[in-house]
Image: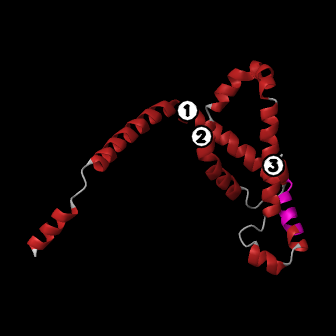
Amino acid sequence: MIVALKALHAEFCLLDITQRVIDPLILEIYFRFAKAFLWQNLGGVLVTAHLAGAMAIADDLDLLLAPVARFIRIAAGYTLSIYLLHFPIELMIAAILHSQPDGPIKTAAMITGALALAVSIGVFIEPQRHWLKSFLWLWFERLSKSMARRWDAPAPDPASAARDNSAAE
């Protein structure tokens, strides 16, 4: 729903409505960092409604999604590559399509192109995920042991430090 509203440029429509209804001086003084508050609140309400609806039908979803559970598990493996790569890919596609007029087709091309390219790169990243995970766990383990040694070391005695300073002078 949010993607559809974004493709239809509802954000700019709501911003235009906000600027027509509320005095520009009030917008500048009180809403400087929240000029798109109508769009942000609409997005928040839609996400909340989606989560509440998903919670309400969660028990029934097991039966409904059982035939496609394997596909969902495979697709879930690509979330890391999608998360890491979608924004840079969208910027690249936006730069490529810069000369095209803005609109729903350009937005849909950016979203589907970014998703398709991120998943296709994910085919190569996914097998490396387990190696990367074990490497990061090892690194964090070494880092935490090093930090624990520093924190567990006895604190210097302020009196002896003062004596050492006075003796040095």
Residue 81 tag number: 2
Near-viewer residue (59 or 43): 59
Q: Residue at 38% across / 36% down in the picture?
A: 138
Q: Position of residue 45 (x, y in %)?
A: 82, 50
Q: On the rendered structure, is 142 left or right of 30?
A: left
Whole-angstrom CA distance, mark 2 to mark 3, is 22 Å
Q: Is residue 6 magenta?
A: no
Please identify, in this view, whether the residue under mark 1 or under mark 3 is nearer the observer.
3
Closer to us: 70 or 44: 44
Binning the other alpha carbons within 10 Å of mark 2 as few (below 14), some (14 to 19) or many (20 upward) gives many
Give the mark nearest the N terminus, 1 or 3: 3
Magenta segment? 8-17
Give x and y (percent) for residue 167: 9, 71
Question: Could you say which is closer to the camera, residue 166 or residue 110?
Answer: 166
Query: Quarter of the image containing the C terminus?
Result: bottom left
Quadrant of res 149: top left
SS for dot 2? helix
Decide: is 6 above or below 139: below
| For marks 2 and 3 on the same chain, the one whose residue lies earlier in the sequence | 3
Outermost residue toward the bottom in this view? 25
Task: Give the amino acid type for the residue marked by disc 1 in the picture.
Answer: Glu
Q: Please name the residue that numbered disc 3 is placed on.
A: 2
* 150 vs 22, nearest the viewer: 150
Q: Secondary structure at mark 1?
A: helix
Q: Residue at x 59, y 39 (%)?
A: 80
Mark 1 = which residue? 126
